[in-house]
Image: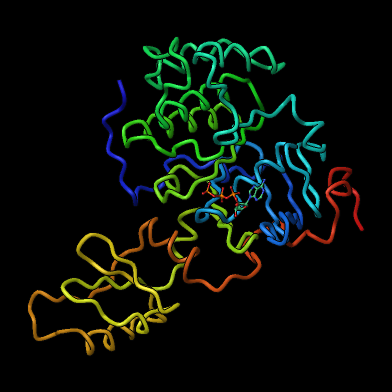
Amino acid sequence: MASERSVAETEEPTRTATENPTTNSVLEVRGVEKGFGDGQVLTGLDLSVERGELLTLMGPNGVGKSVLLSCLAGSTEPDAGEIGLFDGRSPAAARPDVSVVLQGDTIDPDLSGRENLQFYGDLHPRATDDWQALVERLELAADIDRPAREYSGGMKRKLELAIALSVDADLYLLDEPTAELDLAMIQVVHDLLLEYRDAGATILVTSHAPLDARIADRIAFVRDGRTVATDRPTTLLDRLPPVARVRGDVPPESQFLGDRVFQRGDEVRGFLSSDDDLESIESVVESSDDRVTVDRDPPSYTDLFNYYTYVQPARGDSSNAASSESNRTISERAEGTER
Ligand SMILES: Nc1ncnc2c1ncn2[C@@H]1O[C@H](COP(=O)(O)OP(=O)(O)OP(=O)(O)O)[C@@H](O)[C@H]1O
């Protein structure tokens, strides 16, 4: 039975692996570029994932999250840049210690759920029988002998996740594991990922759902093919410009940073240069109408997503501590050598 615990969007992560100062890097990505034909997808992406942390890679549809994961898994060759896993191994060399789910790329529709699990279990050297408990937790047990072609989108996501998590890996690369899941099942998946993280696994999850920010030790936002911000969720929230909430009227977008406003239910939200801008918004809305309110509101994870996706000018990620080391190659760092 799925947990009934509510998923509060602004709930903060309860356990944070990155508070442990002894962690070290499991995944290093430096200047990765990848294009298809004339279209450039990744344009020099840097990323570092620490041992035992759960990092959520966020960005809008089509920004290149899956392409990056495919590069990390060794399924796609980058055009440029470096990828080092664990002690600087290539994706191909690291494969026995990594468990990967690339969305929509895993399940054989002609096999049942159980046969898919057995097929992938035979392929991976670190596969376990944990899939039986996982399909129970994910409420897939009743459908496990049906052909996968009959599965809904959410059932396929759950089967992919059971395949990935039944491997006793050191690093999990999970492409949008909560896509198409209902809220109760998202909570189950979040609980599972935190359990794996707490047991010592390193997890990289991609997502365009602000809800997935709540389990992240760190979030990395991708925009225009590179990371534009990487930090703990609370740090990123603290760093956001003031958020204005307007109810009862829609002020001009030009009043807000990035000339953007965001509709949420019956309110409009936008970012301000400073709290002083609240007054100028009040001056342009229908302030004689009692139903119109303008106030400052604490930022939510949706605000965080909107800011880094649509408002902040795209630029390199100065907050990614690892990028300050980008002048050293991954192999140099793996060997502990200095330039
Ligand atoms: N094999 C390919 N050939 C050509 N273009 C591709 C290929 N694979 C990905 N792309 C393009 O790369 C871009 C990034 O795709 P990707 O699937 O990585 O996005 P994403 O960030 O994972 O999006 P979503 O959140 O929708 O899953 C898209 O424009 C996509 O069309």
Residue 37 falls in image quadrant? bottom right
Whether 135 is drawn above or below 105: the answer is above
Q: Nearer the viewer, residue 131 or 318?
A: 131
The quarter in which the C terminus is drawn is bottom right
Q: Image quadrant for the N terminus?
A: top left
Colour pattern: rainbow
The x, y position of residue 176, in whole percent, is 51, 40
Residue 27 is left or right of residue 66, and the answer is right
Q: Position of residue 40 (x, y in %)?
A: 69, 60
- Residue at 49 percent across and 60 percent down: it is 236
Count of picture labels: 0
Residue 246 lies, in percent from the top left, at 23, 73
Q: Would you say 228 lies left or right of 212 here?
A: right
Residue 311 appears left or right of 252 = right
Query: In this view of the protein, which residue sits in the foreground, 163 or 273?
Result: 163
Does 36 sit above or below residue 55? below
Q: Residue at x 59, y 11 (%)?
A: 118
Q: At 33% across and 86% down in the image, what residue appears?
A: 276
Q: Is residue 244 above or below residue 20?
A: below
Which quadrant holds residue 258? bottom left
At a point 49% along the width and 32% down the height, the residue shown is: 193
Of residue 178 and residue 189, the one placed in the foreground of this image is: 178
Q: Residue 244, image x and y in percent?
A: 30, 73
